[in-house]
Image (cartoon, rainbow, N blue to C red):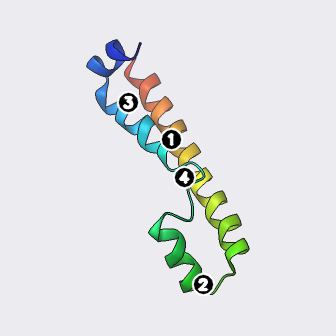
Amino acid sequence: MMAGLAATQSSLVALAIGAGSVFFCHVNDAGFWMVREYFGLQLKQTIWVWSILQTIVSVVGLVGTLLWWHWLT
């Protein structure tokens, strides 16, 4: 299903996968623990902050990929 798109727009597919891979990731991410220790947050606070930040990164990445795709086509 994605073979045609992947063959012609492989960089867009890679960006979309990358943006989707950071959506709501936590606990198993080293950055999660670094933010917790650096800011002295409790686990519940860190989950809330990190989840919101990663969701924003993911959505901005997806929007940027869609804009780039629209610009190329």
- x and y percentages locating residue 14 in the rendered image: 35, 36
Q: From what the image shows, is residue 19 above or below residue 46? A: above
- Horizontal arrangement in the rendering, residue 67 relative to residue 10 (left or right): right
Q: Which residue is mark 1?
A: 20
Q: From what the image shows, is residue 71 above or below residue 33? A: above
Q: Quadrant of residue 4?
A: top left
- Give the SS element for disc 4: helix
- Give the SS element for disc 1: helix
- Give the SS element for disc 3: helix
Front-lying residue, 65 or 24: 24
- x and y percentages locating residue 26 in the rendered image: 57, 61
Q: Which residue is mark 3?
A: 13
Callouts 4 and 3 close, C-beta under 8 Å:
no
| Mark 1 → mark 3, Cα distance in angstroms | 11 Å
Disc 4 marks a residue whose amino acid type is Val
Label 4: few (<14), some (14–19) or many (≥20) C-alpha neighbours in 10 Å = some
Callouts 1 and 3 close, C-beta under 8 Å:
no
- Give the SS element for disc 2: helix
Front-lying residue, 16 or 27: 27
Callouts 3 and 2 close, C-beta under 8 Å:
no
| Mark 1 → mark 4, Cα distance in angstroms | 9 Å
Label 2: few (<14), some (14–19) or many (≥20) C-alpha neighbours in 10 Å = few
Disc 3 marks a residue whose amino acid type is Val
Q: Which mark is residue 57?
A: 4
Disc 1 marks a residue whose amino acid type is Gly
Position of the N terminus, as image quadrant, is: top left
Q: Residue at position x 27%, y 18% from top?
A: 7
